[in-house]
């Protein structure tokens, strides 16, 4: 990647920078990633890097934009191909898990941004992504209730929180274990428990 990066057009250089940051975040604490490390990963000087991104925050903004666009596009496509709201929920869950397994640096960066003090633009972008993701889940859950796939008294807001929290828990377990592949192994059984909770009355 490094030799190729020196000769990329501007748009491809920016995309390669995002890829380098996501890769580095999978290997180390995202808050410790420096512009020097990013430039070295790409085989560039810092000066060349700053011609495309004036600040480190600008790089983080590009990363968050990339994450939001790719994740939401993938879950939208997965949900659209499902035959029912319940199937769409499962497809969304599996697609999100696959995305994290393919890009383990992403959740590390998202968690890191949410812990930063103040209201930075990258942090606001993470919050917006979470809200947009939750809105998609809310629509699927409401549709499931309307089609009697989910019980009529289901608390949709709580079900959204639990869905997102379930994925976050799987991510944390895989990070603690130092085993990214674990998230794919554990996901089916964990989702089955979630599904029982939203489809069966007490």
Image: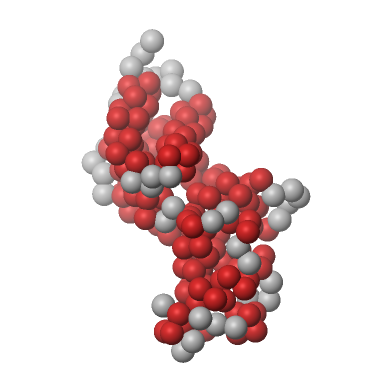
**Residue 133 seen from this side:** yes
Task: Decide which of 64, 109 is in the foreground and name it.
Answer: 109
Q: Is residue 121 above or below residue 17?
A: above
Residue extending farthest to the top is 202
Q: Quadrant of the C terminus?
A: top left
> Is 124 placed left or right of 80 in the picture?
right
Q: Quadrant of the N terminus?
A: bottom left
| Residue at screen point 51% across, 26% down | 158
Picture colour scheme: secondary structure
Residue 38 spot, x, y in % from top left: 56, 71
| Residue at screen point 54% across, 76% down | 40
Q: Is residue 190 above or below residue 16?
A: above
Residue 55 spot, x, y in % from top left: 69, 71
How many marks do you count on the picture? 0
Residue extending farthest to the left is 83
| Residue at screen point 38% across, 45% down | 179
Displayed quadrant of residue 32: bottom right
Residue extending farthest to the right is 118
Displayed quadrant of residue 103: bottom left
């Amino acid at each position: 990647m490094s030799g190729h990066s020196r000769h990329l057009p501007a748009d491809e250089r920016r995309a390669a920078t995002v890829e380098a940051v996501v890769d580095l975040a999978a290997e180390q604490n995202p808050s410790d990633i420096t512009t020097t490390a990013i430039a070295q990963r790409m085989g560039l000087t810092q000066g060349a890097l700053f011609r495309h991104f004036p600040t480190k925050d600008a790089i983080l903004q590009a990363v968050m934009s990339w994450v939001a666009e790719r994740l939401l596009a993938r879950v939208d496509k997965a949900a659209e191909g499902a035959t029912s709201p319940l199937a769409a929920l499962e497809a969304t869950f599996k697609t999100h898990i696959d995305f994290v397994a393919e890009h383990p640096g992403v959740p590390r960066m998202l968690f890191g941004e949410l812990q930063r003090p103040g209201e930075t633009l990258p942090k606001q972008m993470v919050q917006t992504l979470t809200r947009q993701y939750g809105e998609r889940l809310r629509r699927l859950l409401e549709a499931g209730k309307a089609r009697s796939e989910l019980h009529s008294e289901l608390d949709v807001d709580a079900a959204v929180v639990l869905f997102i929290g379930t994925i976050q828990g799987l991510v944390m377990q895989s990070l603690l274990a130092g085993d990214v592949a674990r998230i794919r192994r554990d996901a089916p059984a964990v989702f089955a428990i979630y599904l029982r909770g939203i489809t069966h009355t007490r």
